Amino acid sequence: MSDPFVVVGADAAGLSAASKFRREAPDRDVVVFEMGQWISYAYCGMPYFIEGRVERMSNLLSLSPSEVADRGIDLRRGHKVVGVDPDAKTVAVETTEGDSFEQAYDDLLVATGGRASTGPFDVHGVDGAFTLHNMDTAAAIDAYVAEPDAYDPDRADVSAVDRERVDRNAAMEAPETAAIVGGGYVGVEMAEALVGRELDVHLFHRSGHILSDFGEAVGERVETELDAKGVTVHTSAPVEELVGDGRIEGIAFGGADGAETLPVDMAIVGVGIRPNTELLDGTGVELGAGGAVRTDEYGRTNLPDVYAAGDCATAVHAVTGEEAWMPLGLTANRAGRAIGATVAGDPSPVGEIAGTAVVKGFDMEAGRVGLVGDEAAREAGFDPVRETVTAGSRSGYYPGAAPTDVTLVADRDTGRLIGGSIAGPDRAAIRINTLATALEADMTVPEVERLDLAYAPPFSPVWDPILVAAKVLNGTLDGD
Ligand SMILES: Cc1cc2nc3c(=O)[nH]c(=O)nc-3n(C[C@H](O)[C@H](O)[C@H](O)COP(=O)(O)OP(=O)(O)OC[C@H]3O[C@@H](n4cnc5c(N)ncnc54)[C@H](O)[C@@H]3O)c2cc1C
């Protein structure tokens, strides 16, 4: 009898793979090791839970352990994989009960995700200072921002929750002023969430505009919206230190006026993530972009029968054709599912990535795709040329029409579209999918301009904002 398909990590990539594998190969075994107690959760929903828009933590869960078992998946929670022996084809496992054993595999998927990187800041052991990269922290933040007598313990209604940590945070005096360190998409979402919980919120960003990956035009519009909704946005303001001993007391930051310290009683550090690859140390596995596990178009690593997917793995960039690392939800689910099919005997490519991302800050929506910044475009060998237009989201006479900014970036020599971004308050973000599709199809800007996009007054003007932008950029390309 063959050894099982072993999966490490029971969230987006891992469980997608295990589920697909079981459906395609019902006679073969699949074992999923998960070091924690949480499985099949939606990190993406955590800011909305903290805000209160999502009522219960259980709302953020997809599959329960019993549903996973019903699928014929052997799920072992509290099992950490600490090593891999690619010659013997075994993994070393340690349980939370202190047991350890080795498990043989036929095929292995590493779907271990990433962890919050904290840069130079240490949030451990500092009450009121958090990163947001796990469900227990989301529960703890929710408890911390509530007044002790107003906290509703039913909000954290999942048995996996670290109840002791929640109770400890719930007992602390509620904060009044929060600092968010890092103006990426999680920082923006958390700014909105904490304003929703009636905190005075300060958002710190190292460079000149928040949402750096979305480009300047988007950053400016989202900053204006955050400002209008009461968030103090500090740009070009690198945070130097979290001040406080035991409990957070302040944020020391630099800026135009020199070093300053802002008193705060809460801080959320959102400065990025790092891939979890330690279990492969010493195996000879190749790492690539961002320190993630290098994978090919089928999610294979350089180790025989070892795959990697999701936040811990690289993928191929749809525009550059080069290796890239962009930890996002669909990438993980899609790659996991494809690897499940491949291991079951139906070779399926994991798909390319374009860094397609959307975010909203209050009433301002934004999207980005491909190569938005000039530097990234030049590094990839393109000669970028860009235009930003502002166009209506619907026919001007139809209620709800709002200015929508579209930036398109093309390669000067070939006219190929290589990236774009969108911002606006009226269903702007989802329009990025048109650009994502155009990038995947390697379209030129003239081809984008000729797209037969839908028109009716409630949805779009005759000339969709993307078509307007393509027209303007074509003019620029023609004039060059
Ligand atoms: C606050 C927040 C908001 C986000 N919002 C969005 C969004 O709006 N859109 C979007 O596309 N993406 C978003 N993301 C990113 C998205 O959540 C991730 O891309 C996705 O969860 C990655 O899935 P994964 O399966 O690769 O890894 P994970 O979800 O991190 O799961 C990995 C699992 O592996 C387990 N594990 C790790 N090491 C071991 C080990 N050695 N042994 C056993 N188990 C192990 C971990 O405990 C974990 O359960 C957000 C992330 C955060 C933190």
Image (tube, rainbow, N blue to C red):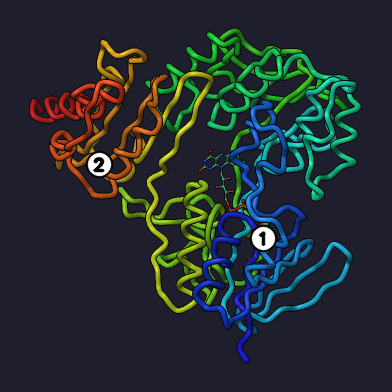
Image quadrant in which you'd find residue 284: bottom right
From the image, tell me which residue sits under label 1: 278
Disc 1 residue type (three-letter): Glu
The answer to whether residue 15 shows anywhere in this view is yes
Does the residue tagged 1 have its C-beta within 8 Å of any atom of ligand 1?
yes
Question: In this orientation, which residue lies closer to the viewer: 126 or 346?
Answer: 346
Q: Residue furthest left?
A: 478
- For label 1, the SS is helix
Does residue 148 lie above or below 374 as drawn?
Answer: above
Where is residue 209? Give x, y as percent. Answer: 47, 21
Q: In which quarter of the image is the C terminus?
A: top left
Using the image, tell me which numbered label, if any, was put on residue 129. none
**Coordinates of residue 192 in the picture (x, y in percent):** 60, 21
Q: Name the residue under label 2.
A: 382
Mark 2 residue element: loop
Residue in the picture at 39% in, 33% down: 430
Image height of 388 relative to 31, above or below: above
Q: Based on the displayed image, in which of its 4 quarters is residue 194 positioned?
A: top right
Asked if labels 2 and 1 touch by Cβ distance under 8 angstroms, the answer is no
Is 256 on the left-hand or right-hand side of 402? right
Judged left or right of residue 359, residue 189 is right
Q: Which residue is drawn at 78% across and 34% down?
A: 155
